[in-house]
Image: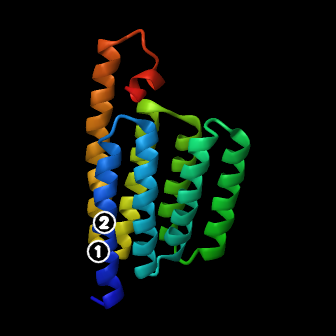
Amino acid sequence: MSTAEIFGQIFGVIALAFCIAGFANRNDDRLMVLLISANVAFALMFACFQSWTAAALTVLVIVRITLARRYPGNRVFLAVLLAVNLVVAWATWKTVTDIFPLTAAVLGTFGMFMLRGIPLRIVLGLAALSWMLNNLVIGSLGGTLAEGMVLVTNIITIIRLHRLRKKYPDLQSDAIVRR
């Protein structure tokens, strides 16, 4: 394993810690802040593995999280970011497996702008599965473990949110998340 790949594995483990903290949280705002930190580590990890489509799209994920927090539900920003994701993927595309980071970026972009609570976490779970497949292809053990933990933690949080919804049926999904 090269020095760059060792650093890539380290960045993957750092991202893992941020992801677990974020997805274990029931508050969407805190989730977004922790995901920004995780994606900085992921971008560095992808760069170390020379997975340029994934690295570039991950930088856009950071921009997307910031905009989605400030402008939730904004269809213009959603459309612009989806278009930018496609252009960036086209410009950096090297292999057919670059479909995995593109799929993850599209799912994440839609989810963060248009969804909250349980639906948001379901879509982000599907995005995590796409990132996991990419990490398997590039050989990132830290990144694969991080996305696997995101999936498990996400499922646990979805169950917790579902139980809260049953306990407080009159509350809207967004109100449950803010508790």
The secondary element bearing badge 2 is classed as helix
Instruction: Answer few, some or many: residues within 10 Å of disc 2's Cα (few below 14, many 20 plus, some between 14 and 19).
Output: many
Residue type indicated by callout 1: Ile
Q: Do we see residue 99 in this rendering? A: no
Residue at x 39%, y 23% (from the top left corner): 176
For the C terminus, the quadrant is top left
Q: Do we see residue 141 in this rendering? A: yes
Residue 10, numbered label: 1
Residue 14, numbered label: 2
Residue 172, numbered label: none
> Which residue sits furthest bottom?
2
Residue at x 39%, y 59% (from the top left corner): 38
Residue at x 59%, y 74% (from the top left corner): 93
**Residue 99, placed above or below residue 1:** above
Q: Residue 55, position in %: x, y?
A: 50, 71
Residue type indicated by callout 2: Ile
